Amino acid sequence: MRTRVLLIEDDERIRAAMRMALEQEGHHVHDVASGEEALRDFSRQPSDVVLIDLVLPGMDGFEVCRKLRAASDVPIIMVTARTDSHDVVAGLEAGADDYLTKPFVPKELSARIRALLRRIRGDARPPPRFAFGDVEVLPQEGIVRRDGAEVHLTKTEFDLLCELASNQGQVLSREHLLDRIWGYGYFGDGRLVDVHIRRLRTKVEPEPAHPRHVLTVRGMGYKLVP
Amino acid sequence: MKGRTAEEAAPEGRPGRRPRFGLRARVTAAFALGTLALALILSLLTYTLSSTYLVRQRESSAQRQAFVNARLVESGLRSDVPLPDLLDSLETPATSESVLSYQGRWFASSPLNVSHEELPAGLRDRVFSGRAVHQRFRLGGQLYEAVGIPLVHVGAHYFEVFSLAELDGTLNTLSRALVAGAAVTVLLGVGFGRWVSGQALRPLTAVGRAARSISQGRLDTRLDPAIDSDLSALTISFNGMADALEQRIERDARFASDVSHELRSPLTTLATVVELLHDRRTEFAEPMRDAIELLKAEVERFQQMVLDLLEISRLDAGVAQPELEAVRPAELVREAVGASGRGTPDRRVAGGDGMRVGVTVDDTVTDLVIRADKRRLERVVANLVQNAETHGGGLAGISLVRCGDRVRVLVDDAGPGIALAYRDRVFERFARGPDAESRRDGHGVGLGLALVAEHVRLQGGRVWVEDRPGGGARFVVELPVETP
């Protein structure tokens, strides 16, 4: 089945070019020019991946991101203008899974989409069922329960949790996690990991500000302890 | 005092027209002269008034005493008291002497040893002519007051000489005290002048400091409007100037940034479309394929340039602080060199064929951990590698060595090396080589090496270029090693 990509971009020419490039990759593209349109479109027919330009007329990209995230676990890639500003972190905190900086080349775009749609890679399969604290995870079913109640994780958060779980007790560097979850190399943006770990904590930690399970190891990375 | 003021004025002052002394020295001198004049006038006035008063006092008491004594002598002569005894019986203090001319003979009590011959002649003459007179005179350096009274009824002339040595001494002491007082006043005047001029110049010192701060790049430096209400015009215009300057510099800096930002969108479209064409280039005829290849290469170069411009304008804006973390330089350099094509979110490391060149790591560096900004360091290595590929005849090798408390990354190329005179300029923005060759191929160094210099500097390191042993250029990046 072809991947359905929802493309939200107000610049007509970029939209046309990206549409061509994505279709060339074999995706089914639905493109809209505003956030309002995108939300309407998404509620009619959910997409597999959403691409959001952060600068939009009317409702801005962050808002669209938050609204989409509230309604769905769909992978979201945001397109930002600047890498250094807090746009990146703000976008990730609004719920984006990954980001692209303009100007980008189509290869980067398709690499990002592929990485997000891919199932957990490699042979380091997580155990069929694992638990820590009051959280229970069923990786095969894609289910996380806390105190018996199901918790909604995005696919990226879920992958991150499973990657940490399959190496329980071991410190995983940001580079390792970037490579495993996002498919980035050594120079991937560590903020991706940091923000997603933060988001993961708010969902699985009893006290997100004082984590007991998803721990930071200063200067080295992260680890999961039961 | 003078030295400091002169030094401060020196860079701005126009030679020849500059006054010999600084403002502060002149104000101080004016204060000194003013207080000196004032002290002189006051001292003279004090001295004149008090000496006149004291002398009058002394004179009138001398006259009173002389008249009393004259009357005593007169009555004594009438009752035929023997003369020397008469004079001795007079109650005269040790500071006065009685001289009597009687029947053509002179008699004297002698505590002061002033003889009748030493009495001023004019005084004597006038007394002999029948008038009571007094006169001050100096004898042997001593000041005396003489009072002469004709004793008409007995045909005698009574003189009394008073020593004014005591008064003289008092006046001397007074004048010394006044001179000392004047000197102290002048000194106080100098001190006060210095203090006042210091106070007056303080706002100017503040202006100077602010101007220096601005010229050192702290463009948001402003004067406190509360410094002095009298100087608000200066403060307002200075701050106005600083505002204008800051805005202008910011506008200039923002321009490059704005231009690059504006270029992003069309460039994204362009890159996307070119890539589409490139992917399907086999569908085109041969000459078109070449055109597409050329187009793709140029768009990539364009894109690189815009990214570099954005990067350097971020650095200029000073908003990009290095994010230091524990990094193994050996690992990082290997990754950076090998990262070609794999892609980072921002851009790919250029070059592809030269990547087979190995990275030589000194034993002391293998497990070394330094604090560095990974992303920036990657740019540094990538840009140096790209520079070697584009301008240095290809990458000849990369090595890491330890050098005391620093670690060095050496990037060698196989080119002709870089002329001594050009070695600093190579790190300037859009620098071009001295040879026509580098111009002809259209590949200026661009911003790559300027970015290298900025990134290295931000991480507390240095970068320079030297000759590689055996020919070619060697770019050296030196970074501090701290125990993490």
Image (spheres, coloured by chain):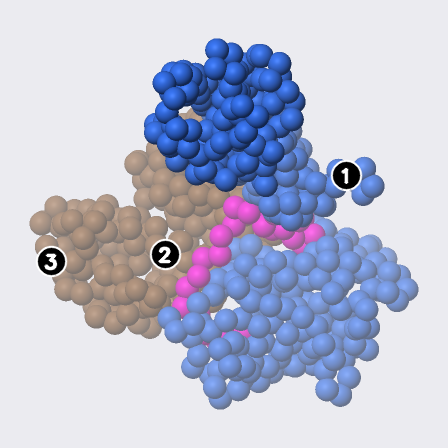
Chain colours: A brown, B blue
Where is mark 2, residue-wise?
A193
- Residue at the (53%, 30%) spot, across then down: B106
Chain at numbered mark 3: A
Question: Camera-side residue: B376 or B60?
Answer: B60
Position of B278 relative to B123 (above/below) = below
The CA span between labels 3 and 1 is 82 Å
Q: Residue B5: x and y, percent?
A: 64, 43
Residue type for callout 2 = Val
* Residues at marks 1 and 2 on the same chain: no
* Residues at marks 3 and 1 on the same chain: no
Question: Camera-side residue: B475 or B137?
Answer: B137
Q: Is residue B368 visible?
A: yes
Q: Quadrant of the N terminus of chain B?
A: top right
SS state under label 2: helix
- Residue at the (30%, 54%) spot, across then down: A197
Position of B303 relative to B90 (above/below) = below
Q: Residue B14: x and y, percent?
A: 79, 40
Where is mark 1, residue-wise?
B18
Residue stretch rendered in magenta on the structure = B304-333
Where is mark 3, residue-wise?
A133
Q: Residue B40: x and y, percent?
A: 58, 28
